[in-house]
Image: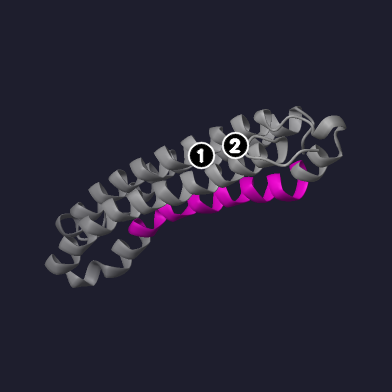
Amino acid sequence: MTQGLFDAISLAMLGGALALIGGIIGSCIGILIAASAGVATITEEPGQFRNVLVLASLPMTQTFYGFIVLLMILTRALPKLSAAPAGGNGLPILFSALIAAVAELISAAYQGKVCASGITLLPKSKGKIMMPSMMLAVYLELFGVLGMVFSILVMSLMGFL
């Protein structure tokens, strides 16, 4: 098996890295948006700090989903790919991981917007908006989970996991 930028192993590893990068970037964007709203809310009503902390941290989970896809590729797909005749083809793994990368990035960023909306209303609602805000943010969380699941499912159906 040849080593290079576009060999099967490199493409598969690139896919795993992109899944993690999508989660990290999306989480950073989502937390930035929610935490920025949180600063203003805490200034207005310091007693809402705990609620702000919870809502602002919700977009963080997409990083873990991207990391799970990376781990699945490193521990399950790469050994099978290495054992394949002529080194196999890493493109299917790369494209499968892109499902997770895009889902994690978009869901985390938009989850931050939903959380920011809830955070800005915490003082006005005396904290009563906390649970409804979390429930609405869970809808976007679901797309992050589905991106991870679909990515793993596709790799599994192709025989890589």
Indicate the quadrant containing the C terminus: top left, top right, bottom left or bottom right. top right
**Residue 65 visible, this angle:** yes
Q: Are marks 1 and 2 in contact (CB under 8 Å)?
A: yes
Q: Please, is residue 95 above or below residue 37 in the view?
A: above
**Residue 131 visible, this angle:** no
Mark 2 residue element:
helix
Apparent side of residue 72 relative to residue 131 in the rendered image (left or right): right
Crowding around mark 2 (Cα neighbors within 10 Å: few <14, some 14 to 19, many 20+) is many
Which residue type does callout 2 highlight? Answer: Ala
Q: Is residue 146 magenta?
A: no
Picture disc at residue 101:
1
Q: Residue furthest bottom?
A: 46
Indicate the quadrant containing the N terminus: top left, top right, bottom left or bottom right. top right
Majority secondary structure of magenta residues: helix
Quadrant of the rendered structure where residue 4 is?
A: top right
Crowding around mark 1 (Cα neighbors within 10 Å: few <14, some 14 to 19, many 20+) is many
Q: Position of residue 31 (x, y in %)?
A: 34, 55
Question: How was this image coloured?
Answer: one colour
Picture disc at residue 97:
2
The residue segment tinted magenta is: 55-77
The one of 73 and 123 positioned closer to us in this rendering = 73
Residue that appears at 33% across and 58% down: 56
The one of 108 and 49 positioned closer to us in this rendering = 108
Q: Position of residue 124 (x, y in %)?
A: 14, 56
